[in-house]
Image (tube, helix red, strand yellow):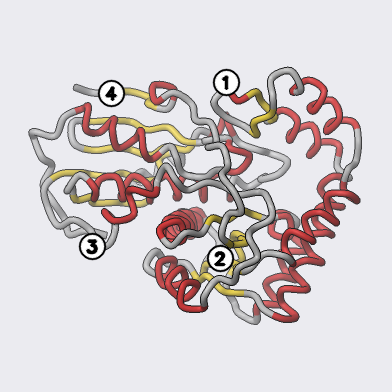
Amino acid sequence: MSARLVADPVLTLDTLRDLVALAVYAPSSHNTQPWRFRLAPASIDLLADRTRALPVNDPFDRELVISCGAALMALRVAAAAKGLAADVRLLPDPADHDVLARVVVGRGVVEPGLADLAAHLLARCTYRKAFDPQAVPDETMAALGAAAALEGGDLRVLDGDQRKLAGELVAEGDHHLWNDPRWRRELAMWMHPRRDGDGLAVPALAAPVAQAVVRTFDMGDGLAAKDQQLLLGSPSLTVLATEEDDPRAWLHAGQALQRALLEGCRRGLQASYLNQPIEVPALRQRLREALGTPGHPQVLLRWGHPAGPVAPTPRRPIDAVIESAVA
């Protein structure tokens, strides 16, 4: 983080809004965008929007907080691109667990290495298709690992038996999750037409049918095979882990995730998530044991060069995520 700084009295509300407008392009589980931003004259509070939680898929709000951590990283990158320092305090209010971070922006020491990532905030996307088969150089993956480490994350490349086991765990996770009617109903609730600005975008005319199919049918068998094939065919596979497994660690995981994603995008890569083994506690423990480390797996990512363009994920209007603004 940057050195302590004094709030800049000439920092405008429009500047803070510009930072938030880029922060919202962070990734989030089911594209729920579970964040709010409270603006003050020279600071931004990042708050968890628990009305957008996934109680079945994410019962402890772990992925929700990781998503907010990614938005925090995007906010820091956006500030650096404007030549602004960002003094970040995590979990600043012990009496309010929804306030995940407070960011004071203004004159001061700009974090090195962040401004160059700003051009990729909008270009980064979740690439759900099969990647181009070209290999990802080892030095590129090492750079992504170094980026994650700067934020307290441990990004490990899986090879050989670890990769094979991860594929098996993804398939088991698909079977487990799709067999749960509550999980299918929750997933269906977040299948929205693109114009809604959030959720898993589906064509407007097809949305009601898609939701009904997901709610009604256990498609675990087919998706298990598809996801396993996607994983095994991906040029690189990683697990992002943290030493601890609590809200502060989840915020670090989100920042490490976003920094690695932006660094990957800068190098021509995109990524997508196969988090099924992490969302099922028993499978998460097996993945942890396979890593041979005391760290806690937080995100399972596949990486590669996109084989073609992909439509950007929709976002809600900026005014929908700003809780209050003090002039």
Q: Is residue 165 left or right of residue 125?
A: right
Q: Which of marks 4 and 2 is nearer the N terminus?
A: 2
Residue closer to the observer: 194 or 175: 194
Q: Badge 2: few (under 14), some or many (20 or more) residues near its Cα, within 10 Å?
A: many
Q: Nearer the viewer, mark 2 or mark 3?
A: 3
Residue 205, given in percent of the width and then of the height, sits at 74, 18
Q: Are marks 3 and 4 in contact (CB under 8 Å)?
A: no
Which structural element holds mark 2? strand
**Circle 4 sits on which residue?**
325
Q: In this view, does 84 lie to the left or right of 62?
A: left
Amino acid beneath label 2: Leu
Amino acid beneath label 1: Arg
Q: Badge 3: few (under 14), some or many (20 or more) residues near its Cα, within 10 Å?
A: few
Q: Distance between the residues labelled 3 and 1?
A: 37 Å
Amino acid beneath label 4: Ala
Q: Do the residues labelled 2 and 3 touch (CB within 8 Å)?
A: no
The label number, if any, that marks residue 240 in the structure image: 2
Q: Distance between the residues labelled 2 and 3?
A: 23 Å
**Circle 3 sits on which residue?**
112
Q: Distance between the residues labelled 1 and 2?
A: 32 Å
**Circle 1 sits on which residue?**
195
Residue 10, given in percent of the width and then of the height, sits at 8, 33
Residue 146, given in percent of the width and then of the height, sits at 41, 72
Amino acid beneath label 3: Pro
Residue closer to the observer: 206 or 279: 206
